[in-house]
Image (cartoon, coloured by chain):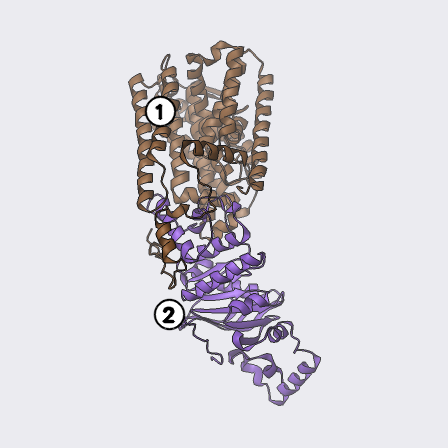
Amino acid sequence: MTTPTSTPPPRTPADPTPPTENVRLAKVAADLQDERLIQPKGLGGSVRAFGKRVRSGDIGSLPVVIGLVVIWVVFSLLNPNFLSSTNLVNLTLQCAAVGTISIGIVLVLLLGEIDLSVGSVSGLAAAILAVSFVNLGWPLPLSLLAALAAGLIVGLLYGFLYTRFGVPSFVITLAGLLGFLGLQLWVLGSTGSINLPFDSWIVQFAQQTFLPDWLSYVLVVLTVLGYGAQLLVTARRRAAAGLSAVPTASIIVRSVALLVVLAVPTWYLNQTRGVGAMFLLFLVLVVVMNFFLSRTRWGRSVYAVGGNVEAARRSGIKVTQVYVSVFVLCSTFAALGGILAAGRLAAANQGSGGGDTNLNAIAAAVIGGASLFGGRGTAFSALLGILVIQSISSGLTLLNLDSSVRYMITGAVLLLAVIVDSLSRRTRVSHGRA
Amino acid sequence: MTVLSPEPVQDAPTSDLVLSLRGVNKNFGAVQALTDIDLDIYSGEVVALVGDNGAGKSTLVKILAGVHPQDGGTITHDNRVVPINNPADSNRLGIATVYQDLALCDNLDVVANLFLGHELGRSTINEVEMEKRSWELLRQLSARIPSVRIPVASLSGGQRQTVAIARSLIGEPRIVILDEPTAALGVAQTAEVLNLIERLRERGLGVVLISHNMADVQAVADRVVVLRLGRNNGEFKVAEVTSEEIIAAITGASDNAVTRRAQSRADSAAARPAADAGSTPASPPEEDRS
C-alpha cells in the first residue's frame, strides 16, 4: 500500500527518555520494554503462560480438542471398531461435505450474522448439478459451474437484502431456507431423485479417489516444512525490526509437534484406503480460508466488522462490501458442500441438504469455537467442529443407536459448546481479554 | 478577520491558518442547530470548543468530520473553499476525528486497531512493519501501553483513549479533533491525555478539543471558542481569561432579559448593523451585548 502511512511520522523534538535509559532499552526488543509485562522464560515459562491464558478464558480450541479425545475414548471403549482405520477413513469422507458448508458458516458467524439456509442451498446445488448433468446432458464442468453460480447468486441476494434493507440475516436466511427448498424440489421435478453415473468424474472424486501413500507423506512433509519456514522467516523479520522473536528451539518443537499431528493420522488412514481426495480438498479450503482471514485486509476487515461495525465503518472499511462478500462466500461454500455430498451419494434427491445438514454445519462451526457473538473464531473451527459432530454421529451409528438418540446427543453437545462459548466470553471479560 | 491572532507556540514549526469556517449553518428539520458559526484552526495550536449541552459542539464536529454536510456557509482549507460532504472528504483534508466512544474493535489487538483500514503491506498484511511502527508511534507519544499484541478490551480507559488518538495520527493528519477525551478518565489518566494533546501541538498539528472540563481547557488550550445555542458566543485567549468569564459565556450569564432589551433597542436604532454579523470577527460577549 502506498498511502501516506508508509512514511514514518516525524520525530518529536524532545525525546523524553534520558540517553542512559535508551542504552539500557536498546538491548531489549521494542515490544518487551515495559516493565509491567510478564515475560515467560524458557519452555516452562511458555507452558505456565499457556495455563494462565486458559484460566483467563482465552481457551481457543482447547475444549474442542479435549471433547474430541473424550468422545473417541468413550466410543472406542463401547465399540473397538470405532477407532479402526476403516471407520476413520469413512469419518473423514463424511466430514468433507458438511465441513465445507461449515467453513461458510464460520465466516458469517465472524460477522455476528447467521445463515440458516445453507442446507437448502446445498440441496439446490446438488439438484442443479444432477438435472443439468444427467437430464439435460451438459458437460460436467458446466454443471458444476452452474451449481456453484447458484450459490453465488443466492449469496448476492442475501447481501443485497441485508445491506440495502437492513433485514436481520436470521430472517432473510430463514426465508431462504424455505424458498430454496422449494426451488430445489421444483428443479428436481416429478422424479424427485436423480442418480449420478458412477463413472462420472465427480462421483469418482468423492467416493473412490484416495491419495497414494507416498503422496500423502510428501504432502505432510511439505506442509510441516512450509509451516516451519514461515515461522522462521517471521522470526527473522521480527528480529531485524528490533522486535521479540520466537526462539528457533520453539519453532523446531512446534514443527515436530505438527509433524506428529499430521503424520500419525495419515499413517493410520493409509493402513486401509488412505486419505480421501475430498477430505484433502476440505483441508485445503480450511487452510486457504485461514490464510485469507489472518493475512489479508479483507480478513482483517471481517474481524473488525464482527467486533465493532461502527468502528470499522469510521476507519474507512467498506462495510457493505464485507457483508456481501461473506454472504456470497457462505452460500458458495454451501453449494460446493452440496456438490460434494451429491458426489459421495452419487445422487441428488428431495432429501439432499435436508435433515440435519443445516444444523450440523452450524453446530460444527460453534462447537469448533466460532463465537455466536461475532469477531471470534478461525477457519479451523469448521474442521474441529465437524470432526466432533461426525465422530458422535459415526460412534452412535456403530452402536446401532436410533437417529432419535443421535439427534438428542448432538443437540446436547451443541448446547454444551454454546455454554462453553458464553462462559469463556464472560471469563474473558472479567480478565480483560474480551 | 483575526482579532485574536493565535499566539505562536515555541515548539511549533509553523502556525498557519489550516481550516477556517465562515457563517456555517446547519438545521435538522425545524431545529436550527448551528447559526453563522465561525471557527479558525491553526497548526500548532490547541483550540478548545466549549459550550453547554445542545450548544452545537457535536454538530460542528460532525460537519468537520463529514458525517453531516453543512447547510450554508463556507469552509476554507489552505485558502481554498472546499466541500466536506462525507468522511472521505474530511480525511483527504487531513482532518482526523477521535469520537467520544473511541470506535475501537475490542476483539482486535492494538496494532490491528491502530492500522485498521490502513494496513501496511501489498497483498498480505505486513504485521512486523505495523508492529514496529506502532511502537515508534506510541513511544513518540510517550504512551504507556505494556503490549501491542493484547486485545484492546484489556486496556484501561486512558490507554484506550491513547490508542484512539494514536490511531488518528496514522494517516498523517493536519488537524485532530478530540471529542471529550477526558470525560471518562481518572486524574492520572486525564493528565496523560493532556500530555498527549501537548505532544500533538508540538508536532505542529491543529488540535480541536471539545471539553466540559474548564480545568482541562485552561491547562492545555491556547484559545477557547464558546458556542451557545448554536451561535458563536465569544472567543478568548486562555492566557488572558478566567474560567469565570468562559463559564459566563457558556451559560449566557451576560445574556439576560436586560441585555437582550438593550441589544434590540441598539439594533433597531442602528438600522440592522447586525446583518453582516456572520462575517465580523467574534468578540467577547460583553462587547457584543452592550
**What x and y, as percent, mark residue A6?**
34, 54
The brown-tinted chain is A
Q: Amino acid at mark 1?
A: Leu
Per the image, label 2 sits on a secondary structure element best described as loop
Tell me: B27 left or right of A376.
right
Q: Nearer the viewer, residue A255 or A112?
A: A255
Check disc 1 and report the residue beneath it.
A259
Where residue A19 appears, as percent x and y from the top left, is 36, 57
For the view shown, which residue lies furthest in the front direction?
Answer: A20
Spatial separation of the CA atoms under disc 2 and disc 1 = 58 Å
Residue A375 vs A399, above or below: the answer is below
Identify the residue under disc 2: B13
Residue B84's place in the image compared with A294, above or below, is below
**Is A65 placed above or below A15 here?**
above
User: Tag on residue B123?
Assistant: none
Q: Amino acid at mark 2?
A: Pro
Q: Which chain is represented by purple in the image? A: B
Q: Chain of mark 2?
A: B
**Residue A393, image x and y in percent?**
52, 18
